[in-house]
Image: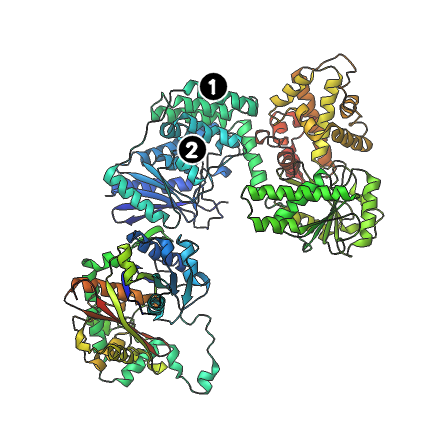
Amino acid sequence: MERREVVFIDGVRTAFGRAGPEGIFWKTRADDMAVKVVRELLRRNPQLPPGRIGDVIFAATAQVGDQGLTLGRDVALLAGIPQSVPGFALDRMCAGALTAVTSGAGEIALGACDLVLAGGVEHMGHHPMGEEVDFNPRFVSERLVDTSAVTMGATAENLHDRFPQITRADADAYAVRSQRRAAAAWANGVMRETVVPMSVFTEEGWRVADRDEFLRPDTSLEGLAGLRTPFRAGGRVTAGNSAGLTDGATACLLAAEETAAELGLEPRMRLIAFAFAGVEPELMGIGPIPATKRVLEQVGLTLDDIGLFELNEPFAVQVLTWCDALGVEPQDVRLNPYGGAIACGHPLAATGVRLLAQLAYGFRERPDVRYGLTGLCVGMGMGAVLLWENLGTGH
Amino acid sequence: MAPVTDFKLARAGDVALVTIDNGEDWTKPTFFGERALESLERVLDELERGDFAAAVITGKPFFFAAGADITEFPGITRERAVEGARVGHGLFGRLRMLPFPTVAAINGACLGGGVELALHCTGRTISSAVRHFAFPEVFLGLFPAWGGTQLLPRLAGPETAIKVIVSNPLRQNRMLLGREVAQLGIADRLLEPAEFVDDSLAFAGELVEQGLERTEPDWSDAELIFRRARTAVDDAVHGAAPAPYVALDLIEGSREWAIAEGYRREEEAIGELLPGPQAQASIYAFHLVDQRAKKHPARPTAAPRKITKVGIVGAGLMARQIALLCLRRLELPIVIRDVKQEIVDDALSDLRAELERQVEKGRYDEGKGRFLAALASGSVDDQGFDDCDLVLEAVFEELELKKRVFAELEEIVTEDCILATNTSALSIADMAADLRHPERVVGMHFFNPVALMPLLEVVRAPETGETALATAWELGERLRKRPILVQDAPGFVVNRVLTRMTRVIMDAIEHGTPVDEVDEAVMSLGMPMAPSVLLQLVGPQVADHVLERMHDAFPDRFPLSPALSALAAGDEPVVLEDAPRTRVQVVEEVLEAVADEIHRLLEEGVVAEAADVDTCLLLGAGWPFFLGGITKHLDQIGMSERLFGHTFADMSAAAPA
């Protein structure tokens, strides 16, 4: 059987909220947030007959409570998608949504179905990291993994240790740039296109969540320099140069290229290749480096062929290690042109599709760019990178 | 004390988003008490000052608003009733006059004042998940007095206004679904629940952009419509309750009156009605069945026995109805026993046919219907009873027969199986007297028709154990009945009071009062059914049989009735003397007899307080809310004071809590 081409049609997310009782989504269910983005996709793509959807794949790191009940199926039913459409949940922590996309892409490429909804949700307020995790004592007794590997902030401090050339000042400078770029992005169209406002019930009654709660457009180097380092005395990782604990949901529509043409759905970009890679768990932030190299090798491209990079920013130092290893300047305009997770937040399993949606928007803004890359690092030492081709112009 | 409701204002772009919230989940209704109205006033100040393009008002998740806080109503004065209506008119009127479009986004239960708030908005959206939309006021002896009688006919026409304000409340307080509210034109948009508030915000945007086209209501047949409506009200309450008539007058008047005049008329009328006897009795009755019966003070605290299988002895009319109820509510195996195989077979095929009807109606899918049918089995001997956790007997009302049934059962069932009896008048202590374990015997007296009548008299004999009592009570709740604890006394509550009343009625007939006259007299009280019709429904033989049982216990007050015996034998009622009573006399005699019997059973301690008697009569005999069961009415007309020197309410106050 011949492999079919897989294209990205559309992607949306909720605004990202601060996890915890102060956050706007505190009284909102995770599955309702996922339903919201799914319904928005259906509304924005009326040519899509819901019954034609072949699978609904949702990622969540915590698959209990309002993120339990094999989320994709649960969300499909709650969203009013016909019962004949199946769904499931998957987990690769921060790469959950990207894995939902590659999994759905696999179904499409093999001809198992024509259309897939893929996304992720993480309500970190309802599900604090590590909730109900029973860490196998063998990890410690056999020294399989350094104990710092389970605390993401500690792995970021480890990166500073391993790459001493990356300083706290570098990280803070990167964070300021991320906030500035995000502020500019909220003024242009990217957020209007990719963020769907959602009415949510709160202590103060119903409100509309339509803006990321971590945005700090007035962030300054001076302000960041004064922040404490919660993961280590005298450390370098602060609340200001890392992504906060976040509630959010994302979803995207993938299609076989021929199905998109049949239904009149505009394909925005084509999935060219993807790779997942494993690294030392206590240095999980370097995961995207081998993943990027592997993806480029697969298709015989070099980094210079790539015009846009949408990378997650759990920690500024994490992005900086990738820049360092691949020879990309941190201020490069190709890298996270709309800011990143430091400014918008990082709802673990949901983030991947935010990167895709923003890349698709970037492709449209930059018709000259042919290839773009979305990537992130994953807890327990992994990296995920997806390579896309811009279909917005005549490439 | 109900939680306080707040109106909370947020901004969504240029739209004001107002939430009606009492800080509790959907199980705690949101009411508009005095402090809620103060909160609304503050939000109106902000809305009037603010630069909004539109406003959307909605409820906390799954609940819009349940209207006025009726706990503020008992004992209210005329002045305060008028003032309450005036404050509501003032605030809702300001909402109506806001200089921008307003949308009530009805996301859940919307009752009474909640509906009126919504009617004062420019437009309304309603969720297709809404199941409770109603003006219950007339059901409570009131009418919607925050503009409901004036705005609903203006919006949806007189026919719809009458249906929603008058007819539905008189039909067991029937409520509307979201879909129906939209069909009637009361809501402008029926929206899916998933993104209801988002979509309502979008509708508000539409209102700002393009306004709203509505068809003018049709008043062309008004005269006929109102004439028909008044006749229908006569048939339902026979003039005994003023509220539906007042509501009709106000709806009719809305055609001519300016809104301010309509408000004034509502204020005037509510000042008369709310402190009046019918409304006060209705509020009392509503409290009994809505609050008190759900968390009854006498609810047993012992652990009930877990029920996994129910046995039913007897396959007659009551037994079949109870069996069906058990199947549908418990979804557990049941076994029916009777003496003859063909009776058992007939009962089982009856059950299956009824389940098939339910499947046809779409209430169950085919598989579920088959599953329920398969749960029922029958027997003519002991088979199938050895693993029952509770066996209920519903055989013929004869003490010796029932004793024999229980004696036989005791040989078959497990040591701790509960034995329940559906007797309506026999002594449970006598029935259990010769058993090895009389403590397992308890009364469970259902009312006919079992599917519709909510009352269950749970009867405690002196020997009845706590487990048996708790099990009967819990089973009753699982069957969605309202249990009331009664002591083992002849006729318990409902049959004792009804039979005493029947005896008075028969006496009038035996003295040559025409049946029609007696019927009219009793109907003028507001009773739901003419006694002669009720008698046919119950069956004169059954009624006569119960009278005999009551006669055995209290021969003085329950003399045997030649007229009833004649009716039971299929003959015309016997007239002994030509001394017909007037209607007024019949009413007086009926009420005096009822008062006397209730007073006696309270003194005997058959139930703890008058509230229990009233609950029994409301839920087991269908007596009207506006009589408050009956003791409220007897107190209101001064009869209890005159007969006993104190009211029934006084007796309750003196009773140990």
| Furthest-top residue in this view | B578
- Where residue B103 appears, as percent x and y from the top left, is 33, 40
In-image side of B405 versus A333 (left or right): right
Residue matched to label 1: B227
Q: Please state which of residues B491 and B347 is positioned toward the viewer in this rendering.
A: B347
Q: As shown in the figure, which amino acid type bears the numbered disc 1?
A: Arg
Residue matched to label 2: B84
As helix, strand or loop, the secondary structure at mark 2 comes to: helix
| Furthest-left residue in this view | A368
Residue B437 visible in the displayed image: no
Q: Quadrant of residue B249?
A: top left
| Furthest-front residue in this view | A1
Residue at the spot x=83%, y=41% of the render?
Answer: B401
Residue at the spot x=69%, y=41% of the render?
Answer: B320
- Where residue B589 appears, as percent x and y from the top left, is 70, 22
Q: As shown in the figure, which amino acid type bears the numbered disc 2?
A: Gly
Classify 10 Å Cα crowding around label 1: few (below 14), some (14-19), many (20 and above): few
